[in-house]
């Protein structure tokens, strides 16, 4: 149930697009990052993979079937993210930004060409940074509420 909620929020975040040179930056990764930390790596992977597909759907699938491949990449990234984040938050942020903007698009270097790859990098870097900043802000705001629930200070209903 919670994974479905975070996946739905990722879909909504995918509707919030910031236009850039190639395509747009979507905010679908924020809920997926939250899910990976709050619910675990599998929930984050599901929210990230499906969130990307739903975001691509609302954008008209500009890269066609490549979006299926990208959604698998996002799922794998969000599967690994909490392990690194839980060791060091800053390493987690750096891991997500680096992999999302430089490593995951590497197949496009061979599938398309180097010009396409390097045209993607600035937009993907900006998008990853914006998603990480929003993730930090939202997590910081909801942590006190989560601690209250764990301690029994907040009623669930």
Image (cartoon, grey):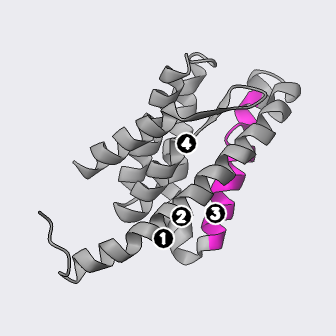
> Marks 1/2: CA distance?
5 Å
Real-space CA distance between mark 2 and mark 4, rounded to the nearest whole angstrom: 13 Å
- For the record, the magenta segment spans 90-108
Mark 2 sits on what residue? 137
- Residue 73 included in the magenta stretch of the image: no
Residue 27 shows which numbered tag?
Answer: 4
**Disc 3 from disc 2: Cα separation:** 13 Å
Question: Element type at marker 2?
Answer: helix
Sequence-wise first label, 4 or 1: 4
Mark closer to the observer (1, 3): 1
Q: What residue is rendered at 20% in x and 75% in y?
A: 154
Helix, strand or loop at label 4? It is: loop
Q: What is the C-alpha distance between the residues marked 3 and 4? A: 16 Å
Residue 20, how many percent across, how many down?
Answer: 74, 31
**Residue 77 pos. (x, y %):** 55, 50
Quadrant assignment, res 37: bottom left
Check whether the beta carbons of the residues at disc 3 and disc 4 lie within 8 A of each other: no
Horizontal and vertical percent position of residue 63: 63, 19
- CA gap between label 4 and label 1 equals 18 Å
Residue depicted at 44% across the width and 58% down the height: 34
Mark 1 is surrounded, within 10 Å at the Cα level, by few (under 14), some (14 to 19) or many (20 or more) other residues, namely: few
Query: Would you identify the image quadrant in which residue 11 lies?
Result: top left
Instruction: Report which residue position mark 3 lands on.
Output: 93
Task: Name the side, left or right, on which 30 lies relative to 8.
Answer: right
Q: Residue 130 placed where, x, y %?
A: 65, 51
Are circles 3 and 2 on residues that touch, CB within 8 Å? Answer: no
Please name the residue that numbered disc 1 is placed on: 140
Mark 1 and mark 2 residues within 8 Å of each other at the beta carbon:
yes
Which of pointers 3 and 2 indicates the residue nearer the eye? 2
Query: Cα distance, mark 1 to mark 3?
Result: 14 Å
Q: Residues within 10 Å of mark 4 (few under 14, many from 20)?
A: many
């Amino acid at each position: 149930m919670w994974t479905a909620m975070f996946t739905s929020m990722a879909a909504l975040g995918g509707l919030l697009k910031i236009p850039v040179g190639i395509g747009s930056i979507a905010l679908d990764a924020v809920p997926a990052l939250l899910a990976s930390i709050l619910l675990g790596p599998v929930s984050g992977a599901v929210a990230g993979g499906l969130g990307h597909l739903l975001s691509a759907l609302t954008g008209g699938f500009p890269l066609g079937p490549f979006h299926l491949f990208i959604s698998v990449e996002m799922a794998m990234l969000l599967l690994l993210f909490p392990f690194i984040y839980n060791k060091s938050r800053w390493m987690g942020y750096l891991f997500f930004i680096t992999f999302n903007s430089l490593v995951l698009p590497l197949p496009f270097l061979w599938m398309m060409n180097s010009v396409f790859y390097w045209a993607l990098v600035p937009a993907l870097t900006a998008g990853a940074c914006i998603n990480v900043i929003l993730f930090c802000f939202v997590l910081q705001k909801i942590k006190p509420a989560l601690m209250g629930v764990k301690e029994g200070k907040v009623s669930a209903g």
